[in-house]
Image (cartoon, rainbow, N blue to C red):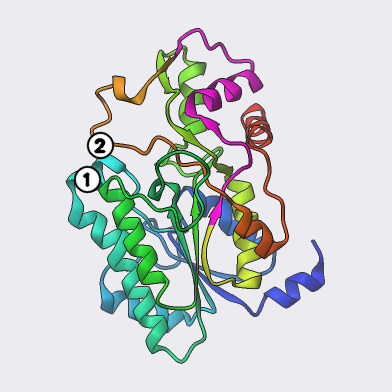
Amino acid sequence: MNKNSKISNSGTRILLLGSTGMLGHTLRPFLDFHGYTVITHGRSNHAQHQVDITDLAEANKLLDTVKPDVVINLVGLTNVDFCETEKNKAYLTNIKAVENISAWIKNTKVSSHLIQISTDQVYDGRDLHAEDHVTLTNYYAFSKYAGELAAASVSSTIIRTNFFGLSHCEKRESLTDWLYDSLSKDKEIKVFDDIFFNPVSMDTLASIIERVVQKKPKGIFNVGSALGMSKADFAFSFADELNLSTARMLRTSSDQVTFLKTYRPKDMRMDCKRIESELGIKLPVLHDEIKRVACEYNK
């Protein structure tokens, strides 16, 4: 690590909301490594603060105490079926919490920038989706989009993304965790050949977020891999990298299963030219990301 870069970053105070979740477990050590002063928030006692940010008074007290230069909001209710049936809980977590953060930023004398993590589920339909090509098809997508609107009222970077990788969070399982566990135990699973996406690894996403902390670009940005694929192709590619048997992995349509109670978008592949241009980067190809993540399971 470059010592000079650590010194230059050490004055930046980051409040990491949802630090004990799946992405937080990857992002926090990455930010620590780069020398930022990271103050953590989460549900577990592993975080420095455990307050309810859906409560305006508690959120204000936390933010007044920390006085962050940057707020990274990883908090989100992401279970699509649960959001559909428990709309008020989805509202509180995905909308109200962001409204509270934004209200504090508007009213404080601290110059604070919000990085809001959103979702690729705000897209549906054919072709790569640019940031203005929004189609809301379920309440989860609606709630995350409404949260984006709240974030956009202040200095903010909104990142629409989908991520995967080895989870270090005991209570959260990633897509690749589920695939690895199921295939290792020879379970029969169904994978969808009619749902397309272009997720990134958690390591890549952490790197992008760190660049955003440095540059603070304002607006909405897609962050995904190049050359997306169906979830079925993703599953088979991941299994091939680990030499796991695919004999009990069945390709199917999402319309043919009964365990999905709520409609999911069929094509969430994102056009990521805007973030690449803004940060001067080239996002990796999805198959390369799969290879990279597969190595984590081989250790």
Q: Which mark is residue 84?
A: 1
How many numbered tags mark residues here? 2
For disc 1, the neighbor class at 10 Å (few under 14, some 14 to 19, many from 20) is: some
The residue indicated by pointer 2 is: 262
Q: Nearer the viewer, residue 7 or 287?
A: 287
Residue 195 in which image quadrant: top left
Can you name the residue that lies furthest to the bottom here?
Answer: 109
Element carrying mark 2: loop
Q: Look at 43% across and 59% down and name the residue there.
A: 18
Question: How far from the left and from the top, in percent, is residue 174?
Answer: 47, 37
Residue 271 versus residue 296 in the image, above or below: below
Q: Look at 50% across and 7% down and name the residue there.
A: 247
In magenta segment, residue 225: yes
Question: How far from the left and from the top, in percent, is residue 286?
Answer: 63, 36
In magenta segment, residue 278: no
Left or right of 35? Residue 218 is left
Q: Quadrant of the N terminus?
A: bottom right
Q: Nearer the viewer, residue 185 or 255?
A: 255
Left or right of 8? Residue 15 is left
Q: Which residues are magenta?
A: 222-250
Question: How far from the left and from the top, in percent, is residue 293?
Answer: 63, 35
Question: How far separated are the C-alphas under marks 1 and 2?
Answer: 7 Å
Can you name the residue that lies furthest to the front here?
Answer: 126
Residue 58 in which image quadrant: bottom left
Q: Look at 40% across and 76% down and name the residue there.
A: 153
Instruction: Specify whether residue 52 is in view.
Output: no
Element carrying mark 1: helix
Q: Amino acid at mark 2?
A: Thr
Q: Amino acid at mark 1?
A: Glu
Question: How far from the left and from the top, in percent, is residue 47?
Answer: 45, 61
Tell me whether circle 1 and circle 2 mark residues in contact (CB < 8 Å).
yes
Residue 218 versus residue 177 in the image, above or below: below
